[in-house]
Amino acid sequence: MSTFGSQLMLLRPAGYNERRYITRQSLGYYRTLAIGGIYTVKREKNDQISQQTFVPALKHCVATHPLLSAVIEGEDTESPAFARPKALNLQDHVGILSINDLQGGAVHSSEKDLMHHVTVRTLDSKFSSVETTPPWKIVVLNLPNHDEDQDQFIQRFFILFAYYHSHGDGKSALAFHRTFLQGLNGQKSDIHESFICETPSNPLPPTIEQAGKLSISWSYLLSPLFGAYLPEFVTKSLGLRASTTPKSANAWKGIKIPFDHSTFTTGLEFFNISPKIMDETLQLCRAHDVKFTSLLHQLVVRALSEALPGNTSTGDDIGSFVALTVVDLRHLLNGIGSNDMSCPGPTASFELFSRGNVENWKDWSNPKSDSPIWTTARQTSKDLAQRANTLHDQPIGLLSYLSRFRPWMQGEAENDRESSYEISNLGVFDPTADAQKGDWDVESMLFAQPANVMGSCLAVNVVTKKGGATTISLTWQTGTLGVGNEQEVVSFVCQLLGKYFGEVA
């Protein structure tokens, strides 16, 4: 390995997918991922929580996950690389918030509103100096307690792990939280603990192209290329199209607005599904041989069909939805485990759904129902299983044929969105897995993505805390949904989804 100057050691060039994320971050098209939860700890009345409380646990995380000590060299170039400083100052990676730090004070806000404030603020934040400071931090909000007059009480914190996508996928955040909880329970806190953290010498995880062979067939490679340039009558006769996504003239894709750094913000709504209702929903899915994510697609289409008008503000009819599912390929890759912080690059599966029909939902919650929605959901489950079990003809594999990411991405940002919504389901977070029991625990989890210039209109983000609630958040780029009051409409979508899950019970 060589070094950049006297302070940084070159680790390796960024892989194709990492280049995509780095370029997108550099252009401002996608900011900060935020995945966190409500942490609890048994505290004495006079104990004080400060930045230093979390330093030993963060040192444990840095020692465990090599990406946490990686900076980005050349983020504005076509050849970005990861490098490592000799040490980190963990003061740069811990943010302690009070309620008064939030917009408008939020003193009388509900706990959910406080979490909303902190999450949106975090999603829209940007990391500076990524060439010298790794782009991640924890954001800690002390939640109000009602029993602080006791000598010993349970203190609750909302703790977000905020990071750039170049430094991990969604599963990486779950790996971070597992390690962080281990550190909180296994490392003794000391008010005199130094914020300076020596960086490890272990190498970064491999890129996806190093970890697996992403083979691309000629037909898959040339279809989007020729589909973009050949006359329409030729592409139809040959079955070619200018994209890997399904096409529909009446699909809802929101509206395109010019990108502006100053007005680029994230909308957020979220709700919880109780463990009881989730267990009953999973039993219903098993009775129909359907995966939960596949049922969720049907529920989202049903809710959008009910919440959105028949036509948009531009007068276009809404008759269908192009759905994207984020698909994890880790189990097919060498050198990247389920508990590693890595950015292998989840791939995507696309499907076109027609606008919801009320008749299709009659008696749907009966385990013996033959409702059409279960037939569609079963097909989605089969398609997703097929997509998740091959490295052949994956959309992410096309990145290796790009020579210049920046102009391509700038061009894509000016085009219409290709999908209506995406579902990204991180699965179950088990805080007790390989963790030392102690005073710290995790009560619930929340997963949210920032606004995305090039992504779907809506991002549906799912995470479940083992033995606890499933949290579903909906995020979007404000001003792009093509409806009147976006917050009210998305809030209504969440209410409808909650009602549908209630029908299972």
Image: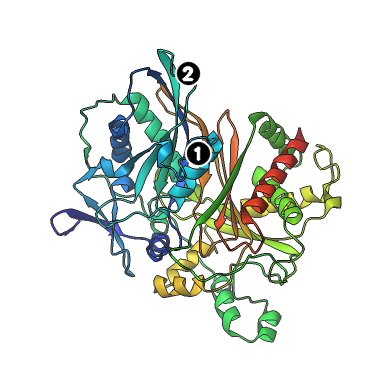
How is this picture coloured? Answer: rainbow
Residue extending farthest to the top is 151
- Which corner quadrant holds the N terminus? bottom left
- Residue type (three-letter) at the residue carrying disc 2: Asp
Q: Is residue 52 above or below residue 77?
A: above
Question: Front-most of 412 and 238?
Answer: 412
Left or right position of 420 against 106: right
Tell me the quarter of the picture where residue 459 sits: bottom right
Q: Is residue 92 above or below residue 50?
A: below
Could you say whether the residue bearing mark 2 is in a helix, strand or loop? loop
Q: Is residue 359 above or below residue 228?
A: above
Tell me the residue at 59%/43% (across/down): 270
Query: In this figure, which residue is indicated by the disc labeled 2?
Result: 147
Label 2 CA crowd tier, 10 Å (few <14, some 14–19, many 20+):
few
Residue extending farthest to the left is 6
Label 1 CA crowd tier, 10 Å (few <14, some 14–19, many 20+):
some
